[in-house]
Image (cartoon, rainbow, N blue to C red):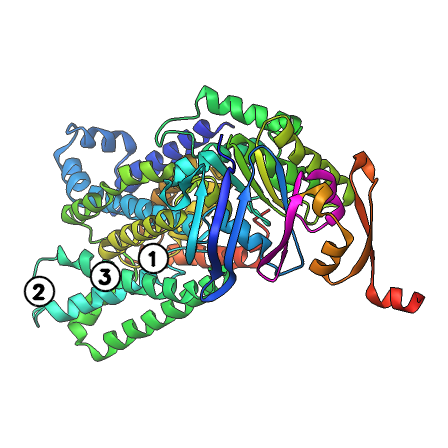
């Protein structure tokens, strides 16, 4: 297995003519959960989109399994690399099973019906996120947490070794966020997938990721194992706030408490 | 009711409308005699009426309905917008401009065309294509905002309409009356040649549609999600739009401005059959054929001996339906 499942080297990435990254190099190690963190507008979602070839690179190179990303045919790439966008959409009258089956697009030959392997993948994906009993339900009738699990099931049905997730806990309350991220970790631990996830909540990132990458203004400030980079001075630099990091949080992971600068100055 | 059963019911309804359409007219022919005449048996006069007068008209109505419904279904999928349809987006009026330009440029004072009538569909397609491209170009800048798509379409349709009215007024009277009949959408002058043109145009589109069923299924997802599952979104969208303009132009060029079928048929098919492309598009085609042939039948049964344009009837039903949809747009996606 190569050292990195997915890598960007000296990449310039942006929208229209405005570059978000001038020179980004990033290696994603296989089999782990890597969380991309940073303030709004720092480029973490942009980096994720470049990894999925949604955004073309202006300069530099992106590669998957040591083959340039631009050389992969669309369907072949989708069998290796799935992505859940921030605000996925589908008609509300579609059933859960119908939606999950859309994850099989890259596997099904163009004119064939749904084959046994496709049905098995859909069934397995629905049971992995525990929505089997909702299979016939229209997705418009689901709660936010259920819907997010169904979208994850669609991604799982794609059976790609690498999965990219753009803020999967957005709009979820804390209970559903924990549940969703447990599933994300399950993708890596039990299914052996490489996961890259954009996360806003630092405590959730520290708790569920193996590695963290901190971005600020189109630059990587720091990256490494959670234990190495989840430090007060790094978080302070990235977000421009004061904070304290406690080493022993839930599941032996560190966690942090933010101090608004003004609050601390007042206390002093 | 299962989906195959619902599709069979639609097919049956279309068959009934077909028989009624062939039977009803200035002289009524009961269904058993219609069937006999279709198979070459029965009375000679029945055979002449059925084969020479009624059949081309009914077949043209069905074909035009099928083509317009498929055009609408493609447009609604490509834009992910339930309000999109060939008439709302200026495609039908654009085709009208193309046909008027053709009629005015190539007919002499005796009202005879100087070139083959087979060029008419090409001009209709060109007109439809220009207006479709204009809408696409405008909406491109807004990254496909669904409401703006409709507004641009309505505005450009108004522009095309203005061009049509202007041409009718400044153009010579004899050409105007010929154009007016065509414009309102009418199949009552249908000949076998018209049926041949539309079926020759629609037939090659059908295998393409079958090939596109899976990509179109995938277009139910937002573009980013669809792309992530392996779909070539831009290619699919472009192919669907092209095919849609082509089908709409094929229907409109011969049968005239039959509006709103491309809106109602795919939408009703989605309500009846769900969002899977194969069943929904098949259902839309059946419904489209039924709506236009039904409207034509209504015109003949209710307004005889006046020949009211079929397009007037479909618009009378379709426009209120469009308003109804407008009031509930935005509630259809999760």
Contact? badges 1 and 3 (CB < 8 Å): no
Closer to us: A33 or B70 = A33
* Circle 1 or circle 3, nearest the eye: 3
Chain of residue at mark 1: B
Q: Which mark is residue B126?
A: 3
How far apart marks 1 and 3 lie (CA) works out to 21 Å
Name the residue that disc number 2 marks: B112
* Secondary structure beneath label 1: helix
Q: Is residue A221 magenta?
A: yes
Name the subunit of mark 2.
B
Q: Is residue A98 left or right of residue A132?
A: left
Front residue of this view, candidates B315 and A187: A187
Q: Going from the N terminus, do you reach mark 1 or mark 3 first? A: 3
Q: Secondary structure at mark 3?
A: helix
Mark 2, secondary structure of its residue: loop
The picture quadrant where one finds residue B98 is: bottom left
Return the x and y of residue A183 as percentages of the image width and height: 67, 33
Whether the magenta-drawn stretch holds residue B252 is answered as: no
Crowding at mark 3 (Cα within 10 Å: few <14, some 14-19, many 20+) = many
Is disc 2 in the same subunit as disc 3? yes
**Residue B53 placed where, x, y %?**
18, 45
Left or right of residue A260: residue B116: left
Inter-mark Cα distance, 1 to 2: 25 Å
In the displayed orientation, state which residue is furthest to the right: A267
Measured in 3D between alpha carbons, the distance from the residue under mark 2 to the one under mark 3, in whole angstroms, is: 22 Å
Kindly tell me whether residue B220 is visible in this rendering.
no
Instruction: Please report the bounds of the magenta region as a residue range.
Output: A198-224
Residue B311 tag number = 1
Image location (x, y in percent) of residue A172: 72, 46
Task: Tell me the quarter of the picture where residue B121 sits.
Answer: bottom left
| Residue contact at pointers 2 and 3, CB within 8 angstroms | no
The answer to whether A208 is drawn above or below residue A230 in the figure is: above
């Amino acid at each position: 297995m190569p050292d990195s499942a997915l890598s960007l080297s000296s990449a310039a990435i942006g929208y229209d003519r405005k570059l978000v990254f001038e020179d980004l190099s990033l290696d994603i190690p296989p089999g782990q959960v890597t969380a991309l963190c940073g303030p709004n507008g720092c480029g973490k979602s942009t980096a994720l989109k470049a990894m999925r070839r949604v955004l073309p690179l202006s300069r530099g190179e992106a590669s998957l399994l040591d083959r340039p990303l631009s050389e992969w045919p669309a369907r072949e790439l989708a069998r290796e690399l799935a992505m859940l966008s921030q605000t996925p959409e589908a008609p509300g009258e579609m059933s859960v099973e119908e939606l999950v089956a859309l994850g099989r697009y890259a596997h099904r030959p163009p004119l064939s019906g749904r084959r046994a392997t496709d049905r098995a993948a859909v069934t397995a994906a629905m049971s992995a996120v525990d929505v089997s009993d909702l299979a016939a339900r229209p997705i418009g009738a689901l709660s936010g947490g259920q819907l997010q699990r169904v979208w994850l099931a669609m991604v799982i049905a794609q059976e790609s070794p690498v999965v990219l997730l753009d803020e999967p806990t957005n709009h979820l309350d804390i209970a559903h966020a924990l549940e969703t991220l447990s599933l994300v970790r399950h993708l890596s631990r039990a299914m052996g997938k490489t996961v890259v996830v954009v996360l806003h909540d630092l405590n959730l990132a520290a708790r569920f990721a193996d590695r963290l990458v901190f971005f600020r203004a189109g630059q990587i400030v720091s990256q490494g194992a959670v234990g190495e980079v989840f430090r007060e001075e790094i978080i302070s630099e990235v977000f421009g706030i004061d904070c304290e990091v406690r080493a022993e949080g839930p599941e032996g992971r560190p966690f942090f408490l933010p101090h608004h600068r003004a609050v601390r100055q007042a206390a002093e | 009711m299962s989906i195959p059963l619902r599709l069979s019911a639609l097919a049956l309804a279309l068959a009934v409308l077909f028989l009624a359409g062939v039977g009803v007219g200035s002289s009524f022919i009961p269904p058993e005699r219609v069937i006999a005449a279709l198979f070459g048996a029965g009375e000679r006069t029945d055979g002449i009426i059925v084969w020479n007068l009624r059949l081309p008209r009914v077949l043209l109505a069905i074909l035009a309905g099928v083509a317009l419904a498929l055009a609408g279904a493609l447009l609604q999928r490509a834009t992910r917008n339930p309000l999109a349809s060939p008439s709302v987006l200026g495609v039908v009026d654009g085709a009208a401009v193309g046909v008027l330009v053709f009629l005015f440029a190539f007919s002499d004072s005796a009202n005879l065309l100087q070139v083959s009538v087979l060029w008419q569909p090409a001009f209709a397609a060109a007109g439809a294509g220009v207006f479709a491209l204009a809408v696409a170009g405008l909406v491109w800048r807004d990254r496909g905002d669904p409401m703006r798509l409709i507004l641009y379409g309505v505005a450009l349709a108004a522009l095309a309409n203005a061009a049509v009215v202007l041409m009718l007024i400044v153009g010579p009277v004899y050409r105007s009356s010929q154009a007016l009949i065509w414009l309102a959408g009418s199949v009552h002058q249908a000949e076998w040649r018209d049926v041949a043109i539309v079926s020759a145009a629609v037939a090659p589109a059908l295998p393409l549609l079958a090939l596109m069923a899976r990509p179109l299924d995938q277009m139910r997802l937002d573009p980013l999600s669809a792309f992530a599952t392996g779909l070539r979104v831009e290619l699919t969208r472009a192919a669907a739009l092209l095919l849609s303009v082509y089908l709409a132009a094929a229907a409109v060029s011969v049968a005239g401005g039959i509006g709103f079928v491309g809106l109602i048929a795919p939408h009703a098919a989605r309500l009846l059959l769900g969002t899977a492309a194969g069943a929904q598009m098949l259902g839309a085609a059946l419904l489209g054929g039924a709506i236009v042939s039904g409207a034509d039948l209504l015109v003949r049964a209710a307004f005889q001996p006046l020949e009211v344009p079929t397009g007037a009837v479909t618009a009378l039903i379709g426009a209120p339906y469009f308003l109804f949809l407008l009031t509930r747009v935005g509630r259809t996606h999760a």
